[in-house]
Every structure is written in C-alpha cells, then in structure tokens.
Image: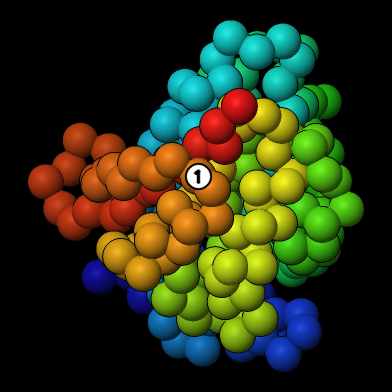
Amino acid sequence: MIPWKLLDKARVPDGGGELCLHCRGQEFSIRVDGVELMNSRSHGSEDALADLACQGIANRPAPRVLVGGLGMGFTLAAALARLPPDGLVVVAEISPAVVAWNRGPLAELAGRPLENPRVRVREEDVGRVLLENPGAFDAILLDVDNGPGGLSRKANNALYGKAGIARAFSALSPGGVFAIWSAAPDPAFAGRLGQGGFSVREVRVRARSGSKGGRHVVWIAKREK
C-alpha cells in the first residue's frame, strides 16, 4: 500500500487544532490533531449539501449564496454547477492554509472552483460574515468542522448554538434556505433550529456518491416568508 505523505500543516486560527494535509497517490486527506476531517474519495454528502440547498432557491433571480467552510472545494463546485449564471457565491474560510491548498495541490479535485468569477473568498470566521450581512443571502451552506459535534476549534460550537442560528436566520432573505452538514445526527441541534424560527427537514445522505457505505446528515432549514 502507498504510504501517506504529509504535504503541509497549519494551526487553525483562534485557538484551534493543527490541520494537516496528506496525500497518497491521487487521494488527499485533511486531518486535525490526527483525526480525519475529510477525504477526497468521500464527498457525496458535500455535493448533496449544495444540491439540497440550491433546490430551494432555483427560481430566484441572481441568487446570493454563502458557503461556510471551504473544505476541499466540492460543496462550492456543486453550488456553482446548480446556480444560474448570474448567481454569486461567497466563501467564508477561517484558515488561510485551506484556501491556499485549494489554490494549490487540491485545486484539480473539484475543478478549480476558486477561479470561477462568480466566487468571492473571505478569509474569516463565517459567524462574522453572517453578522455583518443581514438579509443578504438566499442560501447559507454550513460545513464547518464536523457539524454540531466539532473537532477542530471550540469556537465553532457557537455557530450551532442559539446565537449562531439567530445570526443565520437574520442573514437570510425571506424564504431563504439554511443547509447544514453533519457527520452524525444531533436531535438537540435540530430542535434548536425549530426554536430559531426555521421549518426543518433532516436528510440522510451517502458519504460517497453511489456507495453502500456510511451516511451523513444534512438539515434543510427554511426561513419562512
């Protein structure tokens, strides 16, 4: 078996763990403190996050979408493929290293989506972007850390608490969609979404497209008009 090779490492800003980028042949892995966060062979659920969110805004003119968490670029690429030509995607990624990896060794995995002219990148906490843009987005796609049960940065937990949900609600236009990825179910988080004014649907999606393997969770929360 081909051994894993460490390509780069960086500390997550604001007190987070150590992110490491590994490769093995054409396979890539991003890990935090030795625990795998994502793998280039398993992005079916990241694609589904964009699919499910964009379905809810398909008929809107010039939709604006916020992607919180760049990962390996698969959610961003899927969103671009499903939005109309006049759509705009803002990516909020707190780690400059992750952005650099997506412009470098990871660029070809998702078809170089950061080079798309419809993309704007903000290297900062998605929570700040939400706070500073009331009513600005038709959809918010959140894929930060491991979902509500975070691994890489304790401050990420605030995104999934009542205050974070309220920020997302305020940043959406009426009828907008808040879509959240998680590695596992979390009934308490789903309950908080409902308490925050959203109508909520939980969808189980395959970690790998067309695979019989494990499943992840996507919540589709709609801000009613």
Q: In this view, does 61 lie to the left or right of 1?
A: right
Q: What is the quadrant of residue 190 in the picture?
A: bottom left
Up/down of 194 relative to 17, above or below:
above
Q: Residue at x 65, y 13 (%)?
A: 60
Residue 107 visible in the displayed image:
no
Q: Which residue is drawn at 31% across and 46% down?
A: 202
Secondary structure of residue under mark 1:
strand
Q: What is the quadrant of residue 17 in the picture?
A: bottom right
**Which colour assignment does the render follow?**
rainbow
Question: What is the residue that sits farthest to the left in this orientation?
Answer: 212
On-image quarter of the C terminus = top right
On-image quarter of the N terminus = bottom left
Q: Dot 1 surroundings within 10 Å: few (below 14), some, or many (20 or more)?
A: many
Position of residue 20 measured from the top left corner of the image (x, y, whole percent) = 58, 78
Position of residue 153 measured from the top left corner of the image (x, y, whole percent) = 61, 82
Residue 124 visible in the displayed image:
yes
Q: What residue type is labelled 1?
A: Phe
Question: What is the residue that sits farthest to the right in this orientation?
Answer: 132
Position of residue 123 measured from the top left corner of the image (x, y, whole percent) = 83, 59
Q: Is residue 162 left or right of residue 195?
A: right
In the picture of the structure, the residue carrying the numbered disc 1 is 198
Q: Which residue is drawn at 29% across and 43% down?
A: 203
Up/down of 74 relative to 56, above or below:
below
Q: In this view, does 192 lie to the left or right of 96?
A: left
Position of residue 47 measured from the top left corner of the image (x, y, whole percent) = 43, 38
Up/down of 77 relative to 61, above or below:
below
Question: Is residue 86 or residue 2 the one in the foreground?
Answer: 86
Q: Which residue is drawn at 41% across and 65% down?
A: 189
Up/down of 206 relative to 30, above or below:
above
Question: Is residue 113 or residue 189 the one in the foreground?
Answer: 189
